[in-house]
Amino acid sequence: MTAPASASAPAALGSARPISKHGAGIELIEAGREPRSALRYSFSAGHTEKLKVLTSTAISIELSGRKAESPSLPEVELGISIQVLEVRPDGTARREIALQRVELGAGGALDPSTKRELEGTLGEITKLKGRDAIDRRGRMRALELDTTALADPRLGQLLDQLQQSLGQMGAPFPEEPIGVGARWAVTSEVVQQGMKLQQVATYELTELSGDKGAARIELKQFAPRGSVTPPGLPPNVKAEIVSLDSKGLGKLRFDLKRSVPEGQLRTKAKIKVRTTSAGRQEDTSMDLDVRVRFQPEK
């Protein structure tokens, strides 16, 4: 559910910083059964869509082979509004993204004071606004978020997750006509927590009727071994990726008259990072289980 981007970008939002960087493109693997058609979105200027994004994360951490206490986090619910500002002659839509609400949902084992503090911190992201550009094939051409109103540096990790969610809330299609059973791969680059990950999402078209259909997604992420600079790393500490194994499965339903599909994605990752400080090395291993669901709202 990730879309590749090009160098074209929407109008800047003050001192907005781009947080999404997408790469290679879309490769058709199988065209599927007849009848086949070239799937294209139809955008309307002024049209607004609202959606709900729910994210839950389970974390297990080991420090030099010793299991560390890992936080049990509640589900985070985001309310997002996406308005089509204009439709260009080639059919590309320029959209405005607004974060309207953030709530903590079920799960987790936080004490009341920690939960209140977390709710206050998360509430800051309702100040976020952004713009993107998406073409008729559902490829996100650019994504920028204006973060100038955010004062809390702890929101960096949430912004990374938000980048992932916004980039994955799409169903990009190949250039060629396709039918049920078609398979295509979308390759992109994702920057997360100081790591540059190569991501390959393979889609399979499982249903198609008129403007509506459904697809399955298989996701894989790769990272070469090498130095990284995660947020908050002290200047006297060096960090490198030792290994990363990340896979995901998902499904979505799309409507070519809407720019955002409905779906879900579950990703499991094993990450090993080595830090070096004053000649001393320490290995940190993390198991992440992330579930993202997104659905339209009225």
Image: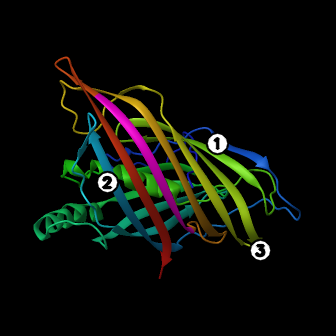
Q: Amino acid at mark 2?
A: Leu
Mark in the foreground, 1 or 2? 2
Q: Earlier in the sequence, mark 1 or mark 3?
A: 1
Q: CA distance from mark 1 to mark 3?
A: 25 Å
Residue 232, x across and y down, in percent: 22, 38
* Mark 1, secondary structure of its residue: strand
Can the viewer see residue 77?
Answer: yes
Q: Nearer the viewer, residue 290 or 230?
A: 290
Tag 2 secondary structure: helix
Q: Which residues are magenta?
A: 262-274
Which residue does the numbered mark 2 point to in the structure image? 158
Q: Residue at x 54, y 73 (%)?
A: 47
Residue at 36%, 58% in the rendered image: 57
Q: On the image, numbered disc 1 is attached to which residue?
A: 25
Label 1 crowd bin: few (<14), some (14–19), many (20+), radius 10 Å: some
Q: Quadrant of residue 241?
A: top left
Name which residue type carries label 1.
Gly
